[in-house]
Image (tube, rainbow, N blue to C red):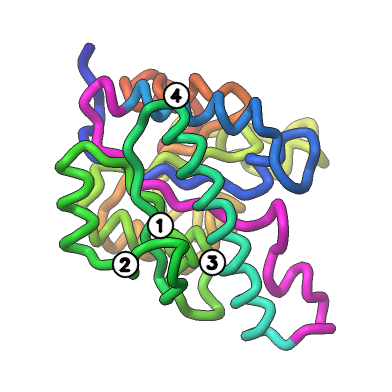
Amino acid sequence: MAIAYKRVLIKISGEALAAEKKTGYDFPFVTSVCEQIKSCVALGAEVGIVVGGGNFWRGVKDGGGRIERVSADRMGMLATAMNCLALGDALSRCGVAAKVMTAVDIQGVGERYDTKKAIEYLEGGKVVIFGCGTGLPFFSTDTAAVLRAAEIHADAILLAKNIDGVYSDDPRKNPEAVKFDEISYADVLARRLAVMDSTATSLAMDNDIPVVVFALADPANIVRVLRGEKLGTLVK
């Protein structure tokens, strides 16, 4: 079956891995996500993943002024490394070859990120899980996802979230919020819509990488988006 994107970068929030538990892992859900990623690989896609750390620590948001920003952000990087190990193990159990690459040196956790090596792994059929964000404080994992997508020449970013698309306002607070089927990067920035942070959105715009925002509540949505089904919101 044809796929719409050959090489994709899937951004998964840490909170999504916890599902209804909010913290830690919902292992049946994690397995379900990995089974869908396995299906993507079977369809011929090359898959990179950036995962957040919010199921353990959300950097400065959790620091709440009690922990200095740089330290808080580095704690968030470590949280993403734990999630990379969990995803890597779950993918292995599903029969998928995966490599963890980290933006900082963490011996025993993964290889130090190298663009050329990452592309070699992708072309060899391995899923590459990118950990520790950009390796620098003050940058979100959204920005890391767009950066890695640009570096590996991804055809699209699949932004798997706890909401089913981009809305004109927060639909949880405003029942009259309108969902967009498609929207431009410029409009996202001008309206200050909470798709990704402004740095990530600007980087995606500058590199002309389409972003598909969709709900991960049903992990099968990953494959649907890969096949080009009209799902969620396309940002381009």
44 sits left or right of 145 in the view = left
31 sits left or right of 68 in the view = left
- Separation of residues labelled 1 and 4 (CA atoms): 18 Å
| Residue that label 3 marks | 140
| Residue that label 4 marks | 36
Residue drawn at 41 percent across, 65 percent down = 102
Give how far across and how far down residue 145 sits, in percent. Answer: 41, 56
Residue drawn at 71 percent across, 51 percent down = 55
Amino acid type shown at disc 3: Ser
Marks 2 and 4, the one that precedes in the sequence: 4
> Dots 3 and 1: beta carbons under 8 Å?
no
Give how far across and how far down residue 166 sits, in percent. Answer: 57, 39
| Residue that label 2 marks | 113
Dot 1: within a 10 Å radius of its alpha carbon, few (fewer than 14), some, or many (20 or more) residues?
Answer: many
- Separation of residues labelled 3 and 2 (CA atoms): 17 Å
- Start-end of magenta stretch: 41-67
- For the residue pair 169 and 69, the one nearer the viewer reads as 69
Residue drawn at 43 percent across, 71 percent down = 107
Depth check, mark 3 against mark 4: the one in front is 4
- Separation of residues labelled 1 and 2 (CA atoms): 8 Å
